[in-house]
Amino acid sequence: MEILVNDVAYTPTGGPDLSVQALAEEVSARCPDGVRRLVVGLRCDGLEVPQERLDEVLARPVSAFQTIQLQTLPAAALARATLLQARAVLEDSAGLRGQIADHLDQGRHEQAMADLQRLVEVWKHAQQSTQACADALGVPLGELAVEGATVNDALASMKEQLLQLKQAMEDRDFVLVGDVLRYEMAQPTQRWIAVLDALLSRTL
């Protein structure tokens, strides 16, 4: 059996029963050059592992294959690209919030609901990206503080506004929904952008 990491022969610390998942985690954890890296590519017996088979292959022992090739990239570079994308999406969400409020003012409730679903997905993606990038960078989110508040405070603030928005929607109080979107969501969104900026500073 041959294991290659970035086309260089690699000897894992575990035995032949080591899973491919454990191998990938071991490779990511080892930082011989002091640079934290993440596995971004996996080939087994010369074939790229398709997304739909990834979980199955990761669960198998390394001894199930003749050759395993892993490609890695610096975690900071990957995290930076992801964080910049999440930041841009959050910045753009201000326009989407205003657009939803305008739809509600003009009685276009169906369009407003569709755009509101997009907005919720934006916030969900930002939260997932933040957590994933913090993990990749080895930064405990609970210890990160921005604008005099912790990340947990920022999350609580965003959750509070989302709950208020949900209640207003259920009450069909579209005036309140518009106000929350236009005004109340501005500060939590800016605070979340500040969280992303704090993580971005760790990627330099």
Image (cartoon, rainbow, N blue to C red):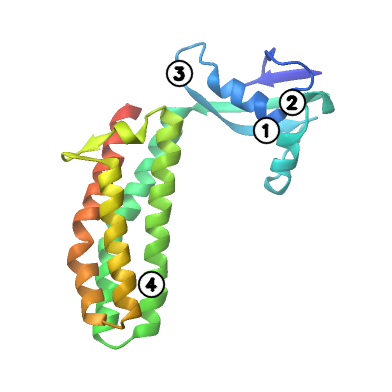
Residue under the point 78% across and 28% down: 61
Tell me whether the residue at label 4 lies in contact with that at label 2, contact meaning CB atoms closer than 8 angstroms: no
Q: Earlier in the sequence, mark 4 or mark 3?
A: 3
Q: Give the CA separation, mark 4 to mark 2.
A: 44 Å
Q: Quadrant of residue 50?
A: top right
Question: Dot 2 lies on which element?
Answer: strand
Q: Amino acid at mark 3?
A: Val
Q: Is residue 15 left or right of residue 138?
A: right
Residue 184 % position (x, y): 19, 63
Q: Is residue 75 left or right of residue 56?
A: left
Q: Give the CA separation, mark 4 to mark 3.
A: 41 Å
Q: Give the CA separation, mark 1 to mark 4.
A: 37 Å
Q: Which of these two is toward me, 70 or 14?
A: 14
Q: Within 10 Å of the Cα at label 4, are there few (<14), some (14-19), or many (20+) other Cα atoms? A: some
Q: Which residue is denoted by mark 3 in the rendering?
A: 35
Question: Dot 3 lies on which element?
Answer: loop
From this view, report whether residue 7 is shown above or below residue 106.
above
Q: Which residue is denoted by mark 1 in the rendering?
A: 42
Q: Which residue is denoted by mark 4 in the rendering?
A: 115
